[in-house]
């Protein structure tokens, strides 16, 4: 079963309105006709509308960096699924390590957010990954397995006529020790965890969904290492942080994936 690579840029708490629009326009100019790779950018909440306008109707999709697990109400500072959809958002990143380890989001809260996002029509990029001390203790697979099992608790295999979970959810393996540090998992390390994730998805659902689901790698992905990572059999794209903030870095990462469908 063919899996088209999916590369998404997580801009985190960066850019201004002007620089966000400039970046989006530069990506559209260079990548607007790319069909071999699915592409998304995830700007800060406050710039979503402006970036959406700059992207227009093209190949680069709009994503958000988080969402609330509640529909509406007295939740100061939160943003709902309906608000994101109103701004043209397709994807939402959930479970990112910075949400888990800086802001204290638990596996159970991530699960509630995934259920809410999927049920309300947003596609999810579900992040998992281990701390450095967990890797050094040989607990990588244990930690990632727990995050996936709890995160997908109660998540159905089917979403609408003709769609299954693999059409709506992407898993992103991001070893915490590699995010923003300049350190990157070796291709062999990434492949080992990605293969485990695919096997776990097969256990939780079935082999067809596992073969179809895309698993991104994230953690200091840059033009110099993208091609080698993307060539791994179970690496189906990248969730790019710092390198997504410059068109001159992000564009080569996307182009490294052209022609590499799995």
Image: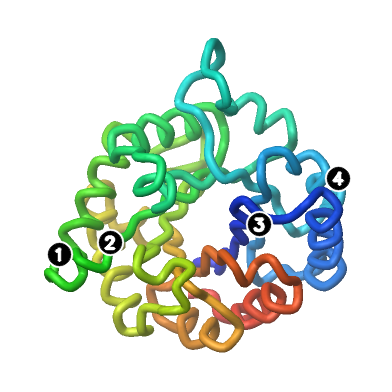
In this rendering, the answer to whether 120 lies above or below 149 is above
Q: Which of marks 2 and 4 is nearer the N terminus?
A: 4
**Which-is-in-front pick, marks 4 and 1?**
1
The local secondary structure at tag 1 comes to loop
**Residue 53 — which label?**
4
Q: Earlier in the sequence, mark 1 or mark 2?
A: 2
Rounded to the nearest angstrom, the CA distance separating label 1 from label 3 is: 31 Å
**Residue 130 — which label?**
2
* Residue 127 percent location from the top left of the image: 41, 53
In this rendering, the answer to whether 261 lies above or below 108 is below
* Residue 28 percent location from the top left of the image: 83, 63
Q: Earlier in the sequence, mark 1 or mark 3?
A: 3
* Mark 1 Cα shell of 10 Å, populated few (<14), some (14-19), many (≥20): some
Residue highlighted by disc 3: 40
Rounded to the nearest angstrom, the CA distance separating label 4 from label 1 is: 44 Å
Q: Do the residues labelled 1 and 2 touch (CB within 8 Å)?
A: yes
Q: Foreground residue, 248 or 124?
A: 248
Based on the displayed image, in which of its 4 quarters is residue 192 positioned? bottom left
Residue in the picture at 21% in, 69% down: 135
In this rendering, the answer to whether 85 lies above or below 173 is above
* Residue 88 percent location from the top left of the image: 73, 37
Rounded to the nearest angstrom, the CA distance separating label 4 from label 3 is: 14 Å
Residue in the picture at 60% in, 61% down: 8
Q: Are marks 4 and 1 in contact (CB under 8 Å)?
A: no
For the question of whether residue 193 can be seen, the reply is yes
Q: Do the residues labelled 2 and 3 touch (CB within 8 Å)?
A: no
Residue highlighted by disc 1: 139
Rounded to the nearest angstrom, the CA distance separating label 1 from label 2 is: 8 Å
Q: Earlier in the sequence, mark 2 or mark 3?
A: 3
């Amino acid at each position: 079963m063919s899996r088209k690579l999916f590369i998404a840029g997580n801009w985190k708490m960066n850019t201004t309105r002007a620089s966000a629009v400039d970046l989006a326009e530069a990506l559209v100019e260079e990548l607007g006709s790319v069909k071999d790779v699915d592409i998304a950018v995830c700007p800060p909440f406050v710039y979503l509308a402006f970036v959406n306008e700059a992207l227009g109707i093209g190949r680069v999709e709009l994503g958000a960096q988080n969402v609330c697990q509640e529909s509406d109400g007295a939740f100061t500072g939160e943003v709902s699924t309906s608000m994101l959809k109103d701004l043209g958002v397709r994807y939402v990143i959930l479970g990112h390590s910075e949400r888990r380890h800086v802001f204290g989001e638990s596996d159970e809260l991530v699960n509630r957010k995934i259920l809410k996002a999927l049920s309300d029509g947003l596609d999810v990029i579900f992040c998992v990954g281990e701390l450095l001390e967990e890797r050094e203790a040989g607990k990588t697979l244990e930690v990632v397995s727990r995050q996936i099992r709890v995160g997908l608790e109660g998540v159905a295999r089917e979403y609408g006529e003709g769609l299954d979970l693999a059409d709506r959810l992407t898993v992103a393996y991001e070893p915490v020790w590699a995010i923003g540090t300049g350190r990157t998992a070796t291709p062999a390390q990434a492949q080992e965890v990605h293969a485990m994730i695919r096997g776990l998805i097969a256990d939780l659902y079935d082999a067809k969904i596992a073969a179809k689901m895309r698993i991104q790698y994230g953690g200091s992905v840059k033009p110099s290492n993208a091609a080698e990572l993307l060539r791994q059999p179970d690496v189906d794209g990248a969730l790019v942080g710092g390198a997504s903030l410059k068109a001159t870095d992000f564009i080569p990462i996307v182009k490294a994936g052209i022609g590499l469908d799995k």
